[in-house]
Image: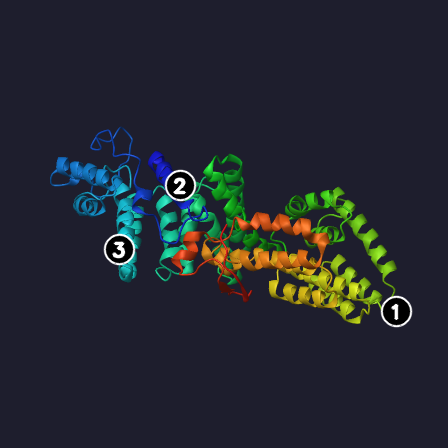
Amino acid sequence: MKGIFSLLATILLLALLSVACTPKAAGPSATETAPASPPTTSTTTPAAGGEELSSCRKFSDARSPDDAETNYVIYRAALKAQEMDRALQVWRQVYAESPAADGRRPTVYTDGVAFYNYLIQQNPDKKEVYGDSIIQLYEQARECYPSDGYMAGLQAFDSYYTYPGSATDEEIYELFKESIEMDGPEDFQYFIVNPMSRLVVDMHEADKIDDAEAKEVATALMTRLDKGLAECEGEMCQAWQTIEAYAPSSLQYFETVKGFYDCDYYVEEYYPDFQESSDDVDVITTTYSRLKWADCAEDRPEFQAVAAAYETKRQEIAAANPSSGGGGNILRQAYDALQNGNSSEAVKLFEQAGDEATDPERKGRYYLTAAKVYYSNLRNFSQARAMARKSAAANPNSGEPYMLIGTLYASSGPLCGPGTGFDSQVVTWPAIDMWQRAKSVDGSVAGKANQLIGRYTQYMPSKSDIFQRGISEGQSYTVGCWIQETTRVRTP
């Protein structure tokens, strides 16, 4: 059974790569669920010793087992040849007589999903009716083949993306969780990672799951992503790279939950950046505040190195910003608050220091520091943007505020959409707008801005995505969610 599931998943992926390499909202097409060829061996072979066949109606239970198996081969051949109407007619006979096929694979059910998606394409006004039939097919397949997580994953995926309202978020979450538990934390289906990374955050924020369960799921998602990236080959790597662009950003929410991650997590996530940029005040501040938040032991070598760098920078900043007209006393208090892990107090003090500063460059820098703490420590995107805008107004010659706003937008895929597809990908348009604006006002950030523009251009909505929505390249488009920016439609 694993073999056919692996083949189905591979075929599904290859078709999905044409839409940003992620599962598409329209569900699997007929060709995506069809195996490469009809079965070449008899499907009515008696079960081998110890083999457990499905308890649902099989070829052997049909009124004429030979006719049932022959019809199965006929409709599968027609499906492969894209003779959809003929294939559908014969499939109905097989589904009525022997929906479990040979008892070893859910092919009749997955093909049924393909047929109903075909009918939706032919009759868009009946999407809801046919969608209900698709969900029923998934449920029947799970009942007939309860030992594999593939069908639970597909049902959850379609319920989440394609047929919203067919199940509650709690029900979809449980289906994804069931799929993960069945297939294991290192082997569950790739298309689960993005939607589940969003759902686990939503469920935790709504107090519907506790820290322990959320951590178990988040760990499984990152474990699967790491393995997928390490073992992928060819086009599959593009799919995993697309997932990598969204899931980790969504799961960063848990960094704001005290005690959710231990010190080792923050050292692994942030200390490498410090090693690469040990003199960068932003890197030092972020790394120090994260390790402090995690209650890392003060005698830990990594903490000692970061703390020493942080204290040096703090003294340099204090010496360069005397209290008279520069907000120096407030600034020292702000860094003390940050040093003590009190980010909420720190942002208020950094803003106050900016308000009191008279020098435009200092004023802009203090506001920008507040913006960065809002983003990296508190994960409050709207407040981070507000502070970045104050920074840009105070020091119009700096491109750093626009660089940060671009990063905020680019990180909003999981916040403004399901983590994949059009709604999540449109955030790249205003993000790139901000990076282009940054380099237009400040040549010193051009290199970094170009690097980000090049990286995120590949994540723009595809030509087919915008065509399906009746929009065209070059026209104006307003990105909703918290962003609310009017931008220009572009494709990779």
Left or right position of 30 against 91: right
Q: Position of residue 310 (x, y in %)?
A: 79, 52
Q: Residue at x 87, y 67 (%)?
A: 323
Residue type, numbered disc 2? Leu
**In the orientation shown, which residue stands out farthest toward the left?**
63
Residue type, numbered disc 3? Gln
Residue 330: quarter of image:
bottom right
Q: Position of residue 230 (x, y in %)?
A: 53, 36
Residue 377 visible in the picture = no
Residue 122: mark in rendering? 3
Q: Residue at x 38, y 37 (%)?
A: 6
Q: Is residue 116 placed above or below 71 in the rendered structure?
A: below
Q: Residues within 10 Å of mark 3 (few under 14, many from 20)?
A: few
Nearest-to-viewer mark from 2 and 1: 2
Given residues 491 and 109, the one toward you in this image is: 491
Q: Which residue is label 2 attached to?
A: 14
Residue 324: mark in rendering? 1
Given residues 371 and 377, the one toward you in this image is: 371
Q: Are marks 2 and 1 in contact (CB under 8 Å)?
A: no
